[in-house]
Image (spheres, coloured by chain):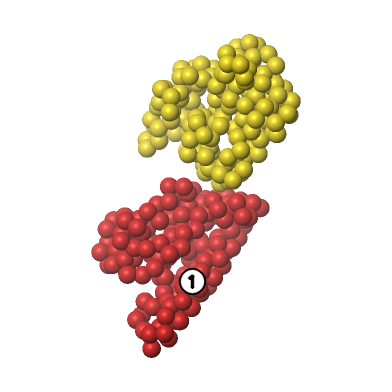
Chain colours: A red, B yellow
Amino acid sequence: MSKDQGRVVVVPCSGIGKPSGSVSREAAYELCESLRPQNTELVALSKLVLGDAATHETVARTPCVAIDGCQQMCASKMVKKSGGTVIHAVAVLDAFRRHRELKAEGIAELNDAGRKLARVMAQEMADTVDAIASAEAAKGESHA
Amino acid sequence: MPEGLEMTAGKFTFRVPEDRLYTAEGIWVLSEVDRPSNRIRVGLTDYLQQHSGDVAFAFVKPSGARLSADETLAEVETIKTLLELPSPVAGTVVEVNPALNLTPEVINQDPYGEGWLATIEPTDWGADRAGLLGPREYLSHMQSQVQEELEKP
């Protein structure tokens, strides 16, 4: 089994100065540092934008979860432009539509609702990461 | 997209079609009263929708609702803020854009077209029309608003 098998790359929005950008990044930190550190790798969108070769290679060979802060969908677009595959895309706006009580405010420091929205999104993505890992494991067994 | 005016501030461009009137709050009013329908169509300006952010929910008073001018016609909640939009005229709501239920983001995608909010049959169009801004007046008002935003610390 390769070291990437069952792992996903997580690419959040890099929107600075907007609460939804902060929610994207908080959700990514929660997922990659707390919930599923063993199955995820956090990639900064800026590295893709700046053309970092190693990051492009990682994105190209690993399934990606994109977290988009707004309808510009920069994270999803940059993954595709970098030759990667978005296996799952989530948007802060859609999460807010499902949890209207969690209105994110603040930029340098998110309010409680914004942090909670990020945790909710991270938990939902963790389920997706688990499903990917299970599918990869099943594929590995069938090849054994 | 109808012909129009526009202004650019940094990476943002705000369009102002010349075929309609405006309120200072950022609602456009397209008159259809010269047609048999005797209605006006209303929506958010490009500046208001860009300034307010991605729309998450849009609730418009239902058809049949009677409104006085400046009474709340719609509430539009974006990722950033909650807008209470006053009716630009007194009258009766005739139709609400059905697309707003499932795809309220159409307000961001096409504010002067598919993203309209409602049609209204005005009670006294002549009187209410006099209080609305022409495209150039609205452009000038919008430029002042943009300037204020830029000067904020």
Q: Please, which residue is most extreme toward the bottom here?
A: A144
Type of residue at label 1?
Val
Q: Nearer the viewer, residue B55 or B95?
A: B95
* Left or right, A128 with reference to B123: left
Q: Position of residue A82 (x, y in %)?
A: 30, 59
Q: Is residue A83 visible?
A: yes
Q: Nearer the viewer, residue A74 or A83?
A: A83
* Left or right, A54 with reference to B73: left
Q: Position of residue A11 (x, y in %)?
A: 41, 61
Q: Position of residue B121 (x, y in %)?
A: 66, 21
Q: Quadrant of the N terminus of chain A?
A: bottom left
Q: Position of residue B43 (x, y in %)?
A: 56, 30
Circle 1 is placed at which residue position?
A129
Q: Is residue A46 visible?
A: no
Above or below residue A78? Residue A31 is below
Q: Quadrant of the C terminus of chain A?
A: bottom left
Answer with the quarter of the image where residue B132 lies: top right
- Residue at figure coordinates x 65%, y 24% from the top left: B120
Query: Badge 1: how crowded within 10 Å, few (<14), some, or many (20+)?
Result: many
- Residue at figure coordinates x 59%, y 53% from the top left: A96
- Residue at figure coordinates x 58%, y 27% from the top left: B42
- Residue at figure coordinates x 64%, y 33% from the top left: B96
* Left or right, A126 with reference to A62: right
